[in-house]
Image (cartoon, rainbow, N blue to C red):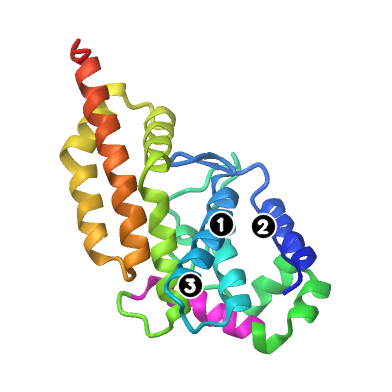
Amino acid sequence: MQKAFKTKLKSILKESFEGSFEKGGGKEHRFFHGMRVARFSEIIARKEKLKVDHDALFVAALFHDIGKIKAVVESGEIDYKSEGNKNHHLVSEQMFLEVLGKDAFDLLGKEFINKVISIIQETHIDLPTLLEVKAIQDADELDNFGYLQIWRTFTYDALANMSFSDALEWWKIEGKASRLKTLKSLWFETTKRIANNGFMRTNDFFVKLYKENSGIFN
């Protein structure tokens, strides 16, 4: 796939979520998340030498959350409790036609679009068979590790009117255990290595921040 066309697809994603925001990520988080997942997926596929359709992987990774446009409410917020959010993987040809526009849709071709749709629809399955899906599932989780996790935690707590102490307690009681559980469920060694490094940075940050909040500065 030509670089110029990839750039066009990225612009389409940005326009799709323009003006949106969410508690766990802030303004237009879903666009930036899609960009990262597309990049992470390419890294995983390359490092693991996966035999995948790289063009389909890129498009599916980039647009894997496009169904969340149905979860955007009047204020621009993506409502996590909405059916649109819960069923965001149930994309269709019609949705892609509306999002991409006829020119881009025709350039990609119906067969290719249906392959992308099949990949996206399987991203919610616990035991997928497609390597493209496994790469995207791992890439998707990387947003929950490292400094990205810290950003998402504090934007969520701030926008949900929670306290600073709430964020610290969340990591200590729930967040840390959740991330360790996720680490064990990742598919590829490349992802596990990146995620583990991210986890160590996150945990170190929260440990130090917890001490500072308690008046300890060493």
Quarter of the figure with residue 38: bottom right
Q: Residue at x 73, y 68 (%)?
A: 100
Q: Quadrant of residue 70?
A: bottom right
Height in image: 4 above or below 144?
below
Who is closer to the viewer here, 9 or 114?
Answer: 9
C-alpha separation, residue under disc 2 versus residue under disc 3:
22 Å
x and y percentages locating residue 24 in the rendered image:
43, 41
Image marks 2 and 1: residues in contact by CB distance under 8 Å: yes
Residue at which label 2 appears: 13
Mark positioned earlier in the residue sequence (2 or 3):
2
Secondary structure type for disc 2? helix
Dominant secondary-structure state across the stretch colored magenta: helix
Assess whether residue 114 is covered by the magenta stretch.
yes
Q: Residues within 10 Å of mark 2 (few under 14, many from 20)?
A: many
The residue carrying mark 3 is 45
Between marks 3 and 1 in the image, the one whose residue lies nearer the viewer: 3
Q: Amino acid at mark 3?
A: Ala
Q: Nearer the viewer, residue 204 or 90?
A: 204
Provide residue 213's location: percent of width, then percent of height. 24, 16
How many angstroms separate mark 3 from mark 1 (CA)?
A: 16 Å
